[in-house]
């Protein structure tokens, strides 16, 4: 049984608009849930980023936010939390995760530099490419098989990584481990794997970073799935994980449970000093970096709340509950269930819709029509086109992500989601594919407009 470790103090009303309205709104939004108004959505599972509910301690902390331009008290608190939890001395606040990527890559990625890692998040990859670098995906092959069980599908393939390092030695900017790995289903990386990558990095004198957006959920999976880790506390596991890397890039909008914020944390003073000018230029002075004092205060507090074991057990348990119940009803889902989301395998859900007709995205639209739930496609629409051939890129997995915001929805909401998706599953043969009617040249999924394909 799931035991929620909090109760409600302040509520936000939500309502479901009638089916005919939903049809109209989706048509107006060009069959793209990103273009729907939030007020026309009943349960919003678009993302877990910045959508969490803050605690009374965080809201109270916001009143204590020190808005001084330089050397604010709130920044002192943020530094203390990061030092205590992650162990790093040098911190640069940024307005969110991608800003941290921007600042770090501006310094570390040389022309043509390579950043190997487990499937990089889209903004992470885009920032490395923006800095004229290149990513190489070295995730283990098990990650591409949606029904195969592997406790740590986010792991890096050490042999592959060794080979890439050997072949490109002089040209590697840094190594990056994304914990948990969002792009393969919110799947964790094991402590053993992190240690193996770290050993390889040290041997080759390469810098190693975490994309740590969901590091606490990753630590919880290590505790519950990895050999000899059950007796360790979450704090101890995080210390061990962090001890393996030179720094982290953090989108605090996830496991630090704030609506906005991020940071870079590093061990080396020299590296910190190199990052400072870029950070000042693009983000702001070193003690606020794109955040207000009150945001920083909420972040400092949220970091502690995000690593509490009761909270993590409920959070990961809630996601697993959704996954298990969908699976029971025959819905094809990625297993094991991720930390922040359940991913539906849309190729298996809609086998008759070819990838060029966006089965994942079509399924998202149908889920909205059926029950006012907004999910997000991670498939062909998101993958975009090959920059050279201009052809659609067809990813191995065509997914629909049901992303669970932190501390927002309760069992009844989740049960509602399950019943809606069950209904969509029962009428899956009637679902039609979509075609693009407007397509922006980059990041097309955010603005694209589509329409259903009519069958004759
Ligand atoms: N890294 C990972 C693993 C992420 O999932 C995200 C964001 C970022 C970096 C970028 O952070 O949004 O603060 O700039 N993921 C969100 C999502 C947007 O919906 O998965 P950001």
Image (tube, rainbow, N blue to C red):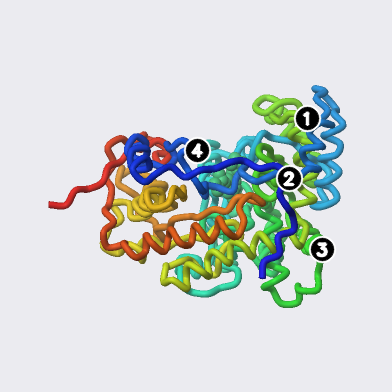
Residues tagged 3 and 2 counted as in contact (Cβ below 8 A): no
Is 135 situated above or below 64? below
Point out which mark residue 9 bears: 2
Q: What residue is shown with label 1?
A: 293
Is 163 situated above or below 295? below
User: Is residue 113 in view from this perspective?
Assistant: no
Point out which mark residue 236 bears: 3
Residue at position x 83%, y 28% from top?
66
Relative horizontal placement of residue 88, taking residue 12 as reference (left or right) = right
Mark 2 Cβ inside 8 Å of ligand 1: no
User: Is residue 141 in view from this perspective?
Assistant: yes
**Mark 4 / mark 2, whichever is N-terminal:** 2
**Mark 1 / mark 4, whichever is N-terminal:** 4
Residues tagged 2 and 1 counted as in contact (Cβ below 8 A): no
Residue at position x 55%, y 37% from top?
131
Point out which mark residue 38 bears: 4
Q: Quadrant of residue 355?
A: bottom left
């Amino acid at each position: 049984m799931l035991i929620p470790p909090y109760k409600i103090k302040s509520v936000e009303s939500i309502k479901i608009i009638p089916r005919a309205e939903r049809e109209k709104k989706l048509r107006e939004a060009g069959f793209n849930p990103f273009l729907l108004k939030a007020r026309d959505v009943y349960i919003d599972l678009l993302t877990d980023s910045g959508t969490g509910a803050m605690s009374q301690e965080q809201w109270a902390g916001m009143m204590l936010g020190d808005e001084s331009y330089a050397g604010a008290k709130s920044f002192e608190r943020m530094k203390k939390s990061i030092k205590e939890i992650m162990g790093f001395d040098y911190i640069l606040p940024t307005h969110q995760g991608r800003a941290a990527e921007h600042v770090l890559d501006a310094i570390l990625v040389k022309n043509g530099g390579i950043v190997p890692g487990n499937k990089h998040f889209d903004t992470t990859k885009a920032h490395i490419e923006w800095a004229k670098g290149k990513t190489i995906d070295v995730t283990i092959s098990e990650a591409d098989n949606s029904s195969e069980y592997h406790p740590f599908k986010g792991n890096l393939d050490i042999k592959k990584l060794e080979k890439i390092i050997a072949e490109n030695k002089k040209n590697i900017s840094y190594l990056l481990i994304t914990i948990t790995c969002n792009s393969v289903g919110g799947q964790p990386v094991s402590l053993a794997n992190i240690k193996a990558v770290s050993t390889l990095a040290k041997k080759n004198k390469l810098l190693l970073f975490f994309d740590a957006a969901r590091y606490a959920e990753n630590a919880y999976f290590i505790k519950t799935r990895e050999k000899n880790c059950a007796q360790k506390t979450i704090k101890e596991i995080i210390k061990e994980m962090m001890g393996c890397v030179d720094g982290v890039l953090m989108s605090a909008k996830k496991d630090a449970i704030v609506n906005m914020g991020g940071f870079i944390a590093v061990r080396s003073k020299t590296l910190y000093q190199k990052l400072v000018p870029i950070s000042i230029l693009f983000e702001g002075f070193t003690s606020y970096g794109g955040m207000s004092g009150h945001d920083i205060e909420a972040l400092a507090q949220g970091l502690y709340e995000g690593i509490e074991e009761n909270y993590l057990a409920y959070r990961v348990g809630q996601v697993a509950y959704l996954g298990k119940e969908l699976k029971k009803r025959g819905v094809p889902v990625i297993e094991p269930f991720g930390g922040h989301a359940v991913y539906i395998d849309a190729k298996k859900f809609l086998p008759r819709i070819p990838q060029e007709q966006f089965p994942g995205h079509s399924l998202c639209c149908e889920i909205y029509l059926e029950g006012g739930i907004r999910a997000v496609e991670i498939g062909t629409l998101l993958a975009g086109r090959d920059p050279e051939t201009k052809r659609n890129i067809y990813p191995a997995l065509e997914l629909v992500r049901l992303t669970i915001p932190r501390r927002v929805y309760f069992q009844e909401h989740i049960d509602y989601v399950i019943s809606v998706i069950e209904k969509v599953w029962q009428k899956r043969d009637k679902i039609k594919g979509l075609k693009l009617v407007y397509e922006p040249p980059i990041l097309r999924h955010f603005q694209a407009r589509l329409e259903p394909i009519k069958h004759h």
